[in-house]
Image (cartoon, rainbow, N blue to C red):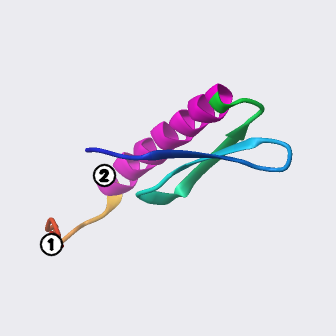
């Protein structure tokens, strides 16, 4: 899986997001801290997705290609 980290300068902090997953966002006082915090947020997001997938009784799972 290829994901894109985007770090932007805010008024007081650097804000990190994952372009492909808008729900993953964090911040830091430096670019490096924003990167690390966003990476942690991404890991938490993926862990929660794995847990959610274990409890869902899916009847269809299909890869979508655009």
- Residue 60 percent across, percent down from the top left: 15, 72
Q: Is residue 39 above or below residue 9?
A: above
Question: Residue beneath label 1, please?
Answer: 60
Q: Is residue 35 left or right of residue 46?
A: right
Q: Residues within 10 Å of mark 1 (few under 14, many from 20)?
A: few
Mark 1, secondary structure of its residue: loop
In the image, 12: left or right of 42?
A: right
Q: Is residue 24 above or below residue 5?
A: below
Asked if the residue at tag 1 contacts the one at tag 2, i.e. Cβ–Cβ closer than 8 Å, the answer is: no
x and y percentages locating residue 2 in the rendered image = 29, 44
For the residue pair 7 and 58, the one nearer the viewer reads as 7
**Going by the picture, which residue comes out furthest to the front?**
9
Instruction: Please check the rendered image and state whether residue 38 is part of the magenta-colored stretch, yes or no.
Output: yes
- Residue that protrudes farthest toward the right in the picture: 12
Of helix, strand and loop, which mostly describes the magenta segment? helix
Boundaries of the magenta span: 32-54
Residue sitting at 14 percent across and 68 percent down? 62
- Eyeballing the image, is 32 above or below 38? above
Q: Between 15 and 57, which is closer to the camera in this rendering?
A: 15
User: Residue at the location (70% across, 41% down)?
Assistant: 27
Q: Secondary structure at mark 2?
A: helix
Q: Give the residue at mark 2.
A: 54
Q: State the residue at coordinates (72%, 29%).
A: 30
Q: Position of 8 compared to 43: left or right?
A: right
Q: CA distance from mark 2 to mark 1?
A: 14 Å
| x and y, in percent, of residue 46 in the image | 41, 45
Q: Which is in the foreground here, disc 2 or disc 1?
A: 1
Q: How busy is the neighbourhood of tag 2: few (under 14 within 10 Å), some, or many (20 plus)?
A: few
- Earlier sequence position, callout 2 versus callout 1: 2
Q: Is residue 9 left or right of residue 66?
A: right
Q: Is residue 42 magenta?
A: yes
């Amino acid at each position: 899986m290829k994901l894109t980290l985007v770090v932007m300068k805010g008024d007081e902090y650097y804000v990190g997001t994952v372009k492909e997953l808008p729900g993953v966002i964090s911040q830091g006082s430096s670019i490096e801290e924003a990167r690390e915090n966003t990476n942690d947020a991404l890991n938490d997001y993926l862990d929660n997705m794995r847990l959610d997938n274990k409890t869902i009784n899916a009847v269809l799972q299909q890869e979508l290609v655009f």
